[in-house]
Image: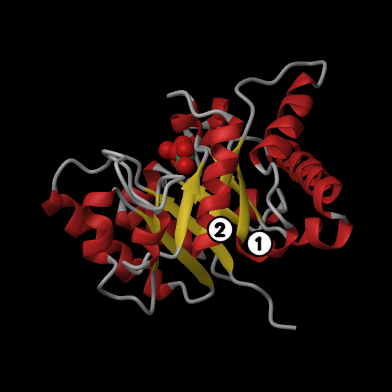
Amino acid sequence: MVKAKTLVVANWKMNPETYKEAEKIYAGSVVALKKASKVKVVLCLPYTWLTDFSHKEKKVVSFGAQDASIEVKGPHTGEVSPTMLTSSGVEYVILGHSERRALGETDELVSQKVSASLKTGLRVILCVGEKTRDLHGDYLLFLRHQIINSLNKIPKRYLKKLIVAYEPVWAIGKSDDEAMNVRDLHETSIFIKKALAEIYGPVEGMKIPILYGGSVSHKNAKDLLTLGEVQGLLVGRESLNPKKFESLLLSING
Ligand code: 13P
């Protein structure tokens, strides 16, 4: 059996400020990812540049959006539909990121977005993660509910295109030594797999890849991946610096 490539998803969020800078980061990222042939890289860019760049370099890099509508078309000002994305060469979409949930996205809306995007053929990176950790393990209940509710009514037949990204909110945007420790990550990734197995059965549920996100850097990426036992990483700030991004990719390319 061919081993699946490690997945690294770069979430540029609302960065950088100008098209010129975006072109530079994009060019640097392509150089970096070409050196790391054992890593599959997905660049999730703001809409303004996404489809411009998605028409270039298609073979080495895949593209993703950072959100998508539940609607197909019509009077929905400011929205972008999953079909618009697929027809523009975009393969992936991040849904339910904590920064969107903080703007009011509920599990119910996230599950509708997941459903609409999967139906269109997009690969969905569903983000989940607790805001805080407590000593009693309440965060585990929160996480379990968030997973179950965000996947409400998503049938088994779409699972091949589903990826779950675990991003504990407390670990996002910090220094790299404040990322989650690898032992806790390992425990939590098992917990998430079990929750998925509860919904979809042990065989299918356990196959869904889990990514970790939250202050991933070239210094901690390898340990998070191998000792945390996740199948990939969701990278924010470090993906905006091509040199550091290259170090990160090379550190896990073995
Ligand atoms: P940072 O890597 O900047 O902490 O961001 C993580 C994140 O939210 C990726 O989606």
Where 33 falls versus 227 (above or below)?
Answer: below
Q: Position of residue 13 (x, y in %)?
A: 35, 41
**Quarter of the rendering containing residue 85:** bottom left
User: Is residue 178 or residue 110 the one in the foreground?
Assistant: 110
User: In the image, what residue type sits under mark 2?
Assistant: Leu
Task: Evaluate if marks 2 and 1 touch, with contact meaning CB atoms under 8 Å apart.
Answer: yes
User: Is residue 168 or residue 51 the one in the foreground?
Assistant: 51
Residue found at x 26% / y 62%: 51
Q: Which residue is mark 1?
A: 158
**Quarter of the rendering containing residue 139:** top right
| Residue 220 visible in the snapshot | no
Residue 118, labelled with which disc?
2
Q: Position of residue 11 (x, y in %)?
A: 40, 48
Where 71 falls versus 162 (above or below)?
Answer: above
Residue projecting furthest to the front: 74
Q: Left of 53 or right of it: where is 239?
A: right
- Disc 2 to disc 1, C-alpha distance: 6 Å
User: Is residue 113 or residue 212 the one in the foreground?
Assistant: 113
Q: Position of residue 244 (x, y in %)?
A: 37, 53
Q: How is the image coloured?
A: secondary structure
Assign the C terminus to one quadrant of the image: bottom right
The mark nearer the N terminus, 2 or 1, is 2
Residue found at x 60% / y 22%: 131
Mark 1 nearby-residue class (10 Å; few <14, some 14–19, many ≥20): some
Residue 65, labelled with which disc?
none
* Secondary structure at numbered mark 2: helix
Residue found at x 26% / y 72%: 55
User: In the image, what residue type sits under mark 1?
Assistant: Tyr
Q: Position of residue 96 (x, y in %)?
A: 52, 38
Where 154 falls versus 214 (above or below)?
Answer: below
Is label 2 within 8 A of ligand 1 (CB to nearest ligand atom)? no
Number of labels in the image equals 2
